[in-house]
Image: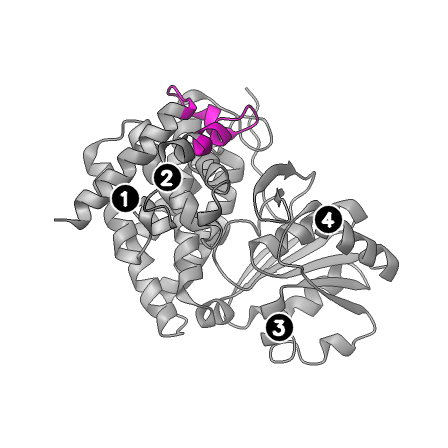
Amino acid sequence: MISTTLFPGRYIQGRGALSRLGSECARLGGKVFLIASPSARERLLHAVLPGIEGMSHVKVETFGRQCSDEEIQRLFALCTQAGCDVVAGLGGGKTLDAAKAVAHLAGKPSVMAPTIASTDAPCSCVCIVYTQDGVFKRTDILPRNPDVVLVDTQVVAEAPPRFLVAGMGDGLATWFEAESCRIKGAPNTAGDAGSMTAYALARLCRDTLMQYGPMALASCAAQSVTPALEHVVEANTLLSGLGFESAGLASAHSIHNGLTALPETHSYYHGEKVAFGALASLFLTDKDPACVDEAYAFCESVGRPTTLAGLGLENVSDEALLLVGEKACADEESMHNEPFETSPAVIADMLRAADAWGTKRKDR
């Protein structure tokens, strides 16, 4: 079987890395279409990138908060109208996914500058599309990865710690899903087998989070750039991105997609829902109790939800969990990469079991 490993063209990380945004864009083209999240435009364009909005070769547009087909088309029309030849994204995961989609439609190179380390979106060719109301719609696999990913750890340290923890939740799922794909021989994002490199990076992602996660969280709370923070930012962004894309996804991300069908979860971040999906997957895949407790202990140590109540679903009905299971088990979902039986009823049971174990640990 052929294996494929996917990478961004260049990954740059460190304090002050955003100062290179202009020069990295200039390597790829002369006129830049910069899509910035509202908060990034307000906080960073003047402080970190002084004068950029006045530059004739940079067109800045504010992201409309939802990576929907409507927003992607709006941004693409503006990019085309401006005649830009490089697309850059500055913000969180949805901003970057929209920027990747616009770059693809325009046939232009892309530069991703995440301002938070909350997801593994920056490095991948994956674009998650939602409805305008925030319900998962589909996953688009684009034909190329970003040309540059640029992560300023000082900016990450100054963001609310909840974002960093959400990224740890997303990263936590990386190895568990990769392991399911390895056991079953399931395909990765490219439709091929995962490589030794991909599986090793997925494992390194998990080990890094377990070792440095709590210290990195403390550093972020103090707005301090430390080696622990650098390690976890790299795990959340690069290792998790390479791991999920090149080794494969399984039930945790499918459960996230299912959870978006419940309005109560819309105020919770992608990584928070993925993390609970990862906990539920431990019961689905019959993991050793020591492995289960290690994962729960890690989530507790960094404040990740370990119960349904932690996702706004304290009184969730059986019917609602079956709906989550139905969406998680849709034909196109990565749930089917699991080497165990899956069905809406099975997934609803796993969610209840994960919630019960989290509750039991809280009551100790």
* Structural crowding at the residue carrying mark 3, measured as other residues with C-alpha within 10 Å and reported as few (<14), some (14–19) or many (≥20): some
Q: Are marks 1 and 2 in contact (CB under 8 Å)?
A: yes
Residue picked out by circle 3: 19
Mark closer to the observer (1, 3): 1
Q: Is residue 335 magenta?
A: yes
Which residue does the image show at 46% across and 72% down from the upper left? Answer: 158
Earlier residue among tags 1 and 2: 2
User: What label sits on residue 295 in the rendered view?
Assistant: 1
Which residue does the image show at 44% across and 69% down from the upper left? Answer: 157
Q: Quick check: 69 above or below 82?
A: above
Instruction: Write the start and end of the magenta stretch as one range.
Output: 323-344
Residue picked out by circle 4: 70
Earlier residue among tags 2 and 4: 4
Residue flagged by tag 2: what amino acid is it?
Ala
Earlier residue among tags 4 and 3: 3
Q: Quick check: 188 above or below 97?
A: above
Q: Are marks 4 and 3 in contact (CB under 8 Å)?
A: no
Q: Position of residue 252 (x, y in %)?
A: 42, 37
Earlier residue among tags 1 and 3: 3
Q: Position of residue 303 (x, y in %)?
A: 31, 57
